[in-house]
């Protein structure tokens, strides 16, 4: 019997609002001294009450809109009740049956395929504190840091539309790109600003309905691990199914050292969260006018920008994709293009320059690039052409190369001269020098 | 008249005209506490040193002719109100040594208005109860007859004012916890509109029902205290930005032309006949004074207790989760049986598979109860009813019958479920025990309630 994977995804994204979700403590906790960004509210002290952060809600709605979700006119917060030491109130303020937005979709693609992933819901909640397990004077102890407690989190849930780990990674890249474009989160995986929870099951190819079980993998913090964990699960579950058994419904974790997933909690141990409407926060009403106003504030997103770059600047998809990966680079490029227009410098040449050279964007102004073009320093050097010439020059000048390796800098200038001669036109000497050094190293 | 027997108004007049100092006034109250607290058990903590310091500071300000609404007035706080640096227990052993790091909004407002915080009053633990007997610090006694309960949960706050141990006190009212003890102790008790007074920094019982109010010796004092505590609070999202009235205005406007509703459901079987008779005489009084008495019906009243005892424990079970034994010194074993009962009830009603049958249904009933009042207030300006179906009962009489205890809130829980304000005023005695009248009005109609209450109080100095 043949099986196909059915994969869905829950992603938590931490917003980079100035203050936390329900109090005025600073939300930026990374690298801070433990328990310095706290107050009665995020410590869950007796009598403390949550007051929702309007900006965080607006940003959550924007993520919803960017993912083509429908914003609900009526929404509310709920309490998710469970005991855990990092949860000082004994409940997490989250959203249950009326998330801020739902029913969206997102297009993902790479060189060989493209597909649509449906978004189930985008909702808002608060982050928990952090447990730090340590040894102190020979004794095992667990410490709690509440700096993260109450930091705004957006949870984005997809339908089980993925078939491969590759698709999941493409989706994650796209999602990360979108929240960065919206400037609502840096989505830095290493800082835990984006956390991933794939759920995986296998179904018989000819079956119509989804499998009755799924394995959920908790809190993965890298795209690479998510890929490995999914592929491991597919293998593990295939083996179970092939042996005639059904995998159990459970929560598993990714063990980085052993490169396997391990069981953490099974269905019968699952929590009953006893959700009910959060009485401390009145429900929300968003009228159509407000939602429309908000959607006008959504910036041009990567897909649209990519298409426009291809069209407006006659760029190939590949170039446009690189230039639109990061909004800062895209803006930089467009600024340079505008300046270059007067000097009749084609956008494609500027694109090549930006793509080929690793420019330090914060140091070099776009105007400086145009200056270089103007001075004639920079001809439109084709990257592949340059590469071929470099290779040839290195092969033809073994002595100079070995001199250079021995630290003779004059040899470098000699090689640059050879390359310039072979090119037969003016080019950026610094670029060539860098490339030679890189090749030889 | 002894200083501690004065009202807020009389105290302020005396202080401003330098007839006596705040220190003298505070000392008189402290003396009375020392004398009576041994038997009445109204206070869990008495802040003698701090109170005298505050009183001296007030005296200095008064000598500089500074004015503040409560400058130099000794006020007691229910031990649910967080006070920075002063032990706050919720009358539970779970928090029996908890010292808060911050003042709640009302505490801050009272301090800013110059009040002298004299102590923290006893109550049913976590405000769970109608008699004051659920306190882990022992029951409070009724000053009119020490064998009787003072009503709860704000038992100590009601008693502290009734026994002249302070000039006024604060309370919380989730199902009648201010109005019932006010009625049992012969003082004025106000449950403001939900959200009129900030809940920030007050230990939560059931968040969607908790209303923050106070006890005073007169209706006029009740209005002047609300002038200090009312208002929207950026730290409490449930305090709407509704204009705060000048509550002391119009107190003497009389009741002529006011339409006063009498709900038949509040006068049926179960109500003590003598109480019924007395309340009817009060209604007659208002009629004679020119009010239009209108018979009305609030048909969903009979579902109120059932509805309340789903929603309230549900929220309680969640609100008490933070006292998980990790943070506040004592473990969950220290919860008393009433708290445990409510935690279990609430956990059950919110559980998957039961939520729709209990919590969700109760929320629907709550909407209907609200609608009943909305409809009624299209026809009338206020509603009169008894506060309690019975007179105060003997200590120990109902402790083994929680259901009977719950039923004592039958006339008060409706105001919490619908959010409307309620004022309890003394109307006299039966068998030497106090009886109260409940005046209900639409949301944010406190001013009208004071006007109606004040008119009776002025005309019937010793009740009816």
Image: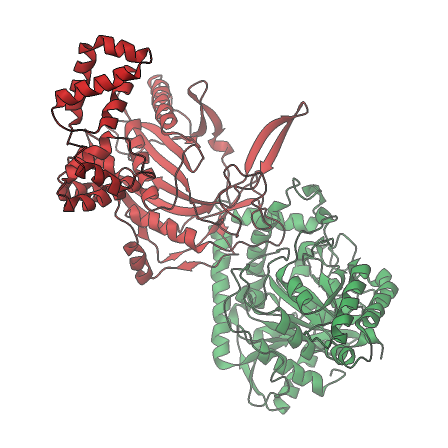
Residue A294's place in the image compared with B221, above or below, is above
Residue B289's place in the image compared with B210, above or below, is below
Is residue B197 in view from this perspective? yes
For chain B, what colour was chosen? green
Q: Residue at x 40, y 51 (%)?
A: A98
Q: Nearer the viewer, residue A93 or A427?
A: A427
Q: Position of residue B433 (x, y in %)?
A: 78, 73
Q: Position of residue A306 (x, y in %)?
A: 20, 41
Which chain: red? A
Q: Residue at x 18, y 42 (%)?
A: A309
Q: Nearer the viewer, residue B420 or B438?
A: B420
Is residue A100 in view from this perspective? no
Image quadrant in which the N terminus of chain B is located: bottom right
- For the view shown, which residue lies furthest in the front direction? A410
The answer to which image quadrant residue A129 occupies is top right
Q: Nearer the viewer, residue A316 or A436?
A: A436
The answer to which image quadrant residue A111 occupies is top left
Residue A124's place in the image compared with A425, above or below, is below
């Amino acid at each position: 019997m043949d099986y196909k994977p059915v994969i869905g995804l829950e992603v938590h994204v931490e917003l980079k609002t100035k203050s936390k979700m329900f109090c005025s403590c600073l939300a930026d906790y990374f690298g801070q001294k433990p328990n310095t960004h706290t107050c009665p509210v995020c410590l869950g002290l007796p009598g403390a009450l949550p007051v929702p952060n309007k900006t965080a809600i607006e940003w959550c709605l924007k993520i919803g809109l960017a993912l083509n979700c429908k914003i609900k006119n009526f929404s509310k917060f709920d309490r998710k009740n469970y005991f855990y030491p990092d949860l000082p109130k004994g409940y997490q303020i989250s959203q249950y049956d009326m998330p801020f937005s739902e029913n969206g979709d997102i297009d993902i693609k790479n060189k060989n395929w493209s597909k649509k992933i449906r978004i189930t819901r985008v909702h808002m909640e608060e982050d928990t504190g952090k447990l730090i397990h340590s040894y102190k004077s020979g004794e095992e102890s667990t410490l709690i840091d509440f700096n993260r407690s109450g930091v705004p989190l957006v949870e984005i849930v997809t339908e089980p539309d993925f078939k491969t780990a590759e698709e999941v990674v493409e989706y994650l890249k796209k999602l990360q790109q979108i929240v960065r474009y919206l400037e609502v989160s840096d989505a830095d995986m290493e800082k835990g600003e984006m956390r991933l929870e794939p759920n995986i099951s296998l179904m018989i190819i000819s079956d119509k309905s989804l499998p009755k079980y799924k394995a959920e993998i908790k809190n993965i913090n890298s795209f690479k691990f998510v890929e490995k964990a999914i592929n491991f699960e597919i293998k593990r579950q295939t083996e179970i199914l092939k042996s005639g058994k059904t995998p159990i419904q459970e929560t598993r974790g990714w063990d980085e050292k052993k490169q396997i997933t391990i069981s953490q909690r099974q269905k019968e141990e699952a929590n009953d969260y006893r959700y009910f409407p959060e009485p401390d926060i009145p429900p929300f009403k968003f009228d159509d006018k407000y939602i429309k106003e908000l959607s006008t504030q959504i910036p041009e997103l990567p897909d649209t920008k990519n298409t426009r770059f291809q069209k407006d600047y006659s760029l190939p998809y590949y170039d446009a994709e690189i230039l639109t990966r990061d909004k800062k680079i895209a803006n930089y490029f467009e600024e340079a293009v505008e300046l270059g227009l007067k000097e009749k410098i084609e956008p494609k040449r500027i694109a090549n320059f930006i793509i080929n050279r690793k420019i330090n964007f914060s140091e070099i102004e776009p105007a400086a690039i145009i200056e270089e073009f103007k001075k004639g320093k920079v001809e439109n050097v084709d990257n592949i052409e340059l590469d071929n010439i470099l290779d040839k020059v290195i092969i033809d000048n073994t002595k100079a190369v070995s001199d250079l390796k021995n630290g003779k800098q004059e040899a470098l200038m000699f090689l640059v001269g050879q390359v310039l001669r072979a090119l037969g036109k003016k080019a950026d000497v610094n670029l060539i020098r860098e490339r030679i050094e890189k090749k030889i190293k | 008249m002894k200083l501690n027997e004065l009202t807020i108004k009389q105290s302020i007049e005396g202080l401003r005209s330098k007839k006596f100092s705040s220190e003298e006034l505070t000392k008189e109250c402290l003396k009375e506490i020392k004398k009576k607290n041994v038997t009445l058990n109204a206070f869990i903590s008495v802040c003698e040193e701090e109170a005298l310091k505050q009183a001296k500071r007030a005296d200095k300000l008064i000598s500089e002719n500074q004015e503040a609404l409560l400058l130099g007035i000794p006020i007691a706080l229910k031990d649910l109100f967080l006070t920075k640096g002063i032990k706050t227990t919720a009358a539970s052993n779970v928090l029996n040594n908890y010292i808060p790091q911050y003042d709640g909004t009302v505490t801050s407002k009272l301090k800013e208005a110059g009040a002298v915080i004299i102590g923290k009053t006893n109550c049913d633990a976590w405000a769970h109860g109608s008699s004051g007997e659920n306190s882990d610090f022992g029951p409070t006694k009724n000053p009119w007859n020490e064998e009787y309960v003072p009503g709860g949960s704000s038992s100590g706050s009601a008693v502290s004012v009734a026994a002249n141990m302070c000039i006024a006190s604060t309370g919380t009212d989730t199902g009648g916890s201010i109005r019932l003890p006010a009625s049992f102790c012969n003082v004025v008790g106000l449950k403001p509109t939900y959200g009129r007074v900030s809940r920030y920094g007050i230990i939560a019982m059931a968040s969607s029902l908790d209303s923050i109010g106070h006890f005073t010796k007169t209706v006029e004092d009740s209005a002047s205290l609300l002038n200090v505590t009312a208002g929207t609070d950026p730290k409490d999202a449930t305090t709407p930005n509704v204009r705060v009235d000048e509550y002391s205005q119009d107190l003497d406007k009389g009741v002529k032309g006011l339409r006063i509703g009498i709900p038949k459901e509040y006068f049926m079987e179960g109500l003590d006949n003598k109480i019924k008779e007395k309340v009817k005489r009060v209604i007659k009084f208002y009629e004679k004074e020119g009010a239009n008495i209108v018979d009305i019906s609030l048909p969903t009243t009979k579902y109120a207790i059932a509805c309340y005892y789903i929603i309230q424990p549900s929220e309680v079970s969640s609100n008490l989760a933070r006292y998980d034994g990790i943070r506040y010194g004592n473990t969950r074993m220290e919860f008393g049986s009433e708290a445990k009962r409510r935690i279990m009830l609430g956990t059950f009603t919110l559980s998957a598979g039961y939520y729709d049958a209990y919590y969700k249904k109760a929320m629907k009933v709550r909407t209907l109860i609200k609608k009943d009042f909305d409809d009624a207030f299209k026809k009338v300006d206020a509603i009169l009813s008894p506060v309690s179906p019975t007179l105060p009962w003997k200590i120990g009489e109902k402790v083994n019958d929680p259901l009977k205890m719950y039923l004592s809130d039958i006339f008060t829980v409706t105001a919490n479920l619908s959010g409307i304000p309620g004022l309890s005023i003394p109307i006299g005695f039966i068998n030497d025990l106090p009886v109260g009248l409940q005046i209900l009005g639409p949301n944010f109609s406190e001013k009208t309630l004071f006007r109606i209450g004040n008119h009776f109080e002025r005309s019937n100095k010793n009740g009816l």
